[in-house]
Amino acid sequence: MDYLARKYLRGRKIPSSACSGCGLGQVHKKVLMAIDQIGLTTGDVVWGTGIGCSGRQTFNTWNGDNFAGTHGRVYAIATGLRLALPPSKKIILTVGDGDAFGIGLLHLLHAARRNVDMTVIVADNFGFQSTGGQYGLTTPDGSVTDSSPYGMRDPNWVQDGRDILDIVKGAGAGFLARHTSIEGQNAVESIKQAIRFKGFSLVHIIYPCVTNYFSKALGTRDPEVACRWLTERTNPKTEIEGLTIKTGIYPVTDGNRLEFSEQMQQITQAVQREKSNGAN
Amino acid sequence: MKRLFDTGNAAITEGAILAGCKVFAGYPITPATEIAENMSRRLPHENGFYVQAEDELAALHICIGASLGGLKAMTATSGPGYILYADPYGWALGSEIPVVVLNAQRVGPVSGITGAPGQGEFYLSRYPTHGGNFESIVLAPNSVQEAFSLTVEAFYLAERFRMPITILADQIVTDGWESLLVPETEDEIKQMGLRIATRKINQGPEFYPATDEIDVPPVVLGHNTGAACSDWTPTSDGYDTEEVIWQHKHAYRLIYKVRNHQDILPHYEEIALDDNPDVILVAYGSPSRVVKSAVRAAREQGLKVGAIRLITLWPFPDKAFERSVKYLSVELNFDGQLVREVQRAMPKGSEVHFLGRCGELPKVTELVEAARTLINNQPLESIQWQREAW
């Protein structure tokens, strides 16, 4: 991390205040590796964050321009920001599963529908962990959490064949991928493609929370056990009851739509052209 | 000077464009929809953008995002949308982001009556979000021309105080048609007393200084200043902190940058107060037009009646109420909102009474009779539950 941290992060925020054994640092590192391998500088990216572990721990770590939005609304903020920034500036958002797939899902889908050029990194730790470990929108079925002491049975986005990426795809997202924090360069490659993509892109990255999720669900805080549990369920030969994580680039059919701010510019330019023609 | 005959909605649009508004994000709602329509037509001519948001939460967040990128932005709504602004409004207050918000008040509670005037968000506009620890700035026009000029002023104040400014209008002001003068040259802008501030960029590293000073440039992202802004309590350089000492500094700034610079806010209007009248009517927005006529009618009948018309609602202009006299607050609600603030501000020994209407304006004769009753030391209790001694 040293090389990447020195190049891209703020010393005051390193090491982060994340718990020992947390997988968020691995997600964060993969995003920085992708940025580095593309060759971007701190001046090329405006970094936004949501609320919860994923947002708070990454806020203002970026040694360029930063913002942290209200819970679940960061996609709407980025939509306005996109209108103001030059097209060459990248907007990268690091948010959590609640921020993206719970409170913020409406705004996320509308950002995908409008094809606003931004890269959303959803760092998913299976629920609301910064508030102590309540089940969320991606918590594996039956999990015991602080708010599901008898086992989580609330229908969510990873049960019964449902996949949240299907919905984001349906809204018009141009690039989607899913990975775990345990994966390596294949995840970095997906993030690179997402950042390079001109339009709305999202990479869903599952990472272990040992303090709150795994301590209750598996009865251990050992990150090695948690990582093995996730790895066993990542691309298994046969489906595993409760949770199967399929990683890689998620196929989309709608990758060439006009980007939102370009669309807006086109309207303005067409009106201006008509005005100057009228004046002649 | 361009002379038009148009609605308050059109005046607000033109005022915003004169002030340099480049982004309007909104969600259709009666009686503010025409502002969105006008903006969608006008902004592309001015190199600006109209975004139709998925809801009012998104509308104000999009405006804030645009402002964070350096573009002046505005949204407009009515009560049901204004309450949804609570979330982004707090963010803009806390992160000190300039943005203009218009509320064309209609009849409540909830969806109420869409196409009739109300004044139910007097207090909501003081506390448009949670958490306290801030002052709000709220301006209230009472005509089409003033809807124009106060929109220009709201953009000006948003930049200097770097905060969201609410224009608290009502359905009669926004839907009503009147003549409107729009300046076309710099001289005409000055002549009309309009003030315009350009966007400045905070170069850091101190983005949130612990002072009451205004004219601190706001955070603008995308200029590689290392700017940081968030919904968290900030250190002076924008880091999020849980330390109470920083919260004290931040709260001091949010409260006192406004309290200590009230002198630059628009003043209230005094009507026929020179001879120490027996009764002073108090109003803002469209009821103040009836109040003005009522003062004239009362004077013709030999009654010593004056009026105070508020333009800046928040911070509340306590100075306007230094006279020990009988006040009568005339409002478009039945619960009495402005009256409570008059009661707080007036000297001991004064009296304050309340006359409420909603969905329609009070009549001139009704106000004159109420004033006469008070002058005759009669109680303002009456046949109808809408009037009562306060």
Image (spheres, rainbow, N blue to C red):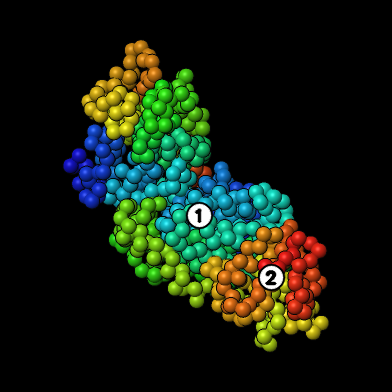
Mark with earlier residue (2, 1):
1
For the residue carrying disc 1, how many other residues have a C-alpha within 10 Å: few (<14), some (14-19), or many (20+)?
Answer: some
Quadrant of the rendered structure where residue B374 is?
Answer: bottom right
| Disc 2 crowd, CA 10 A, few/some/many (<14, 14-19, 20+) | many
User: What's the residue at 47%, 19% (across, down)?
Assistant: A160
In the rendered structure, the answer to whether residue B383 lies left or right of residue A278 reads right
Counting from the top left corner in percent of width and height, residue B129 is at 50, 54
**Same chain for the residues under marks 2 and 1 in the image:** yes
Which part of the image, by quadrant, shows the N terminus of chain A?
top left
B181, B175: nearer the viewer: B175
Res B260 quadrant in image: bottom left
Residue B12 image position (x, y, % from top left) = 62, 62
Subunit of mark 2? B
Mark 1 secondary-structure assignment:
loop
Q: Which mark is residue B129?
A: 1
Q: Position of residue B164 (x, y in %)?
A: 50, 60
Q: Residue at x 46, y 23 (%)?
A: A153
Q: How far apart are the alpha carbons under marks 2 and 1?
A: 29 Å
Which is nearer the eye, A216 or A100?
A: A216
Indicate the position of residue A70 as horizontal and vertical percent values: 44, 47
**Which amino acid lies under the numbered mark 2 shown in the image of this protein?**
His
B155 in relation to A93, above or below: below
Mark 2 lies on residue: B353
The extreme top residue here reads A238
Q: Residue at x 38, y 20 (%)?
A: A243
